[in-house]
């Protein structure tokens, strides 16, 4: 199955505006055109994470959008998610592969080229490159990469079939700059852009998602 990474929503329940429920926000984002969803729950216990993932899976299925679980292979299995997103201190990719169904999506966060090299060796499906810009959503332990930095990651993916999304501080006002500015000298482009706050913290997640999706679509149509 070909996965559309173009508008990759990563959830963040802490950031929901007052009065907006998690599921309403997710459904509006799906209606607005997010193409893949990752459930990221850093504070939930296992039962809560499982429940959120289960409900999210039902909603994502309704919109035929793949669902990926951050950190937790067991939860991905429990809700029959489409894959997992693993950080550098999570389950090793080769172990996750043996646990998950053969066609599961496995993505890995990469903050430097050593991470990228390992991810390519592990034959991951995609890498998340970040943080591109400064963000308050996640405590950053490394300097931001910047768009040119992302370009050098993309160069390092030349000749591989590993897909790439950028994450970190991406908003509607730097969205196109992120896409344009990161094209590598060899012409390698991002396969998508991942956002948390731009959609999750929005009072109108439908509109926010739609704006980004349209921007991505018009950018890719110019290629
Ligand atoms: N990984 C690197 S930056 C980040 C994650 C999960 C947070 C991105 O959030 P936002 O709100 O889109 O800047
Ligand atoms: Mg992790």
Image (cartoon, rainbow, N blue to C red):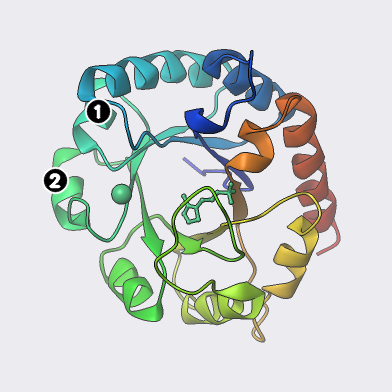
Quick one: which residue is furthest to the bottom in this view?
A: 185
Can residue 27 be seen here? The reply is yes
Q: Quadrant of the C terminus?
A: bottom right
**What is the x, y in percent for residue 63?**
59, 20
Q: Residues within 10 Å of mark 1 (few under 14, many from 20)?
A: many
Residue in front for this viewpoint, 170 or 35: 170
**What is the x, y in percent for residue 145?**
55, 74
Residue in front for this viewpoint, 158 or 9: 9
What residue sits right under mark 1 in the picture? 75
Vertical placement of residue 176 versus 4, above or below: below
**What is the x, y in percent for residue 173?**
81, 54
Q: Quadrant of residue 30?
A: top right
Residue 98 has which mark? 2
Q: Is mark 1 within 8 Å of ligand 2?
A: no
Q: Quadrant of residue 221?
A: bottom right
Vertical placement of residue 184 versus 45, above or below: below
């Amino acid at each position: 199955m070909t996965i559309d990474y173009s508008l990759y929503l990563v959830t963040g329940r802490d950031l929901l505006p007052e009065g907006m429920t998690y599921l309403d926000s997710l459904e509006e984002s799906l209606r607005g055109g997010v193409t893949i969803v990752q459930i990221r729950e850093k504070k939930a216990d296992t039962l809560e994470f499982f429940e959120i993932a289960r409900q999210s899976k039902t909603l994502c299925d309704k919109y035929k959008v793949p669902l990926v679980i951050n950190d937790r292979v067991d939860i991905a299995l429990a809700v029959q998610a489409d894959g997992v997103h693993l950080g550098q201190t999570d389950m090793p990719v080769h172990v996750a592969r043996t646990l998950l169904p053969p066609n599961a999506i496995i993505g890995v966060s990469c903050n430097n080229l050593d991470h990228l090299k390992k991810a390519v060796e592990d034959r991951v499906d995609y890498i998340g490159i970040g943080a591109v810009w400064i963000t308050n959503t996640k405590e950053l332990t490394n300097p931001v990469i910047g768009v040119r930095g992302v370009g050098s990651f993309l160069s390092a993916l030349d000749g591989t079939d590993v897909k790439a999304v950028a994450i970190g501080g991406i908003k509607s006002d730097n969205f196109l700059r992120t896409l344009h500015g990161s094209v590598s000298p060899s012409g390698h482009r991002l396969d998508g852009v991942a956002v948390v706050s731009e959609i999750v913290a929005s009072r109108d997640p439908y509109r926010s998602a739609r704006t980004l999706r349209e921007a991505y679509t018009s950018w890719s149509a110019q290629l």
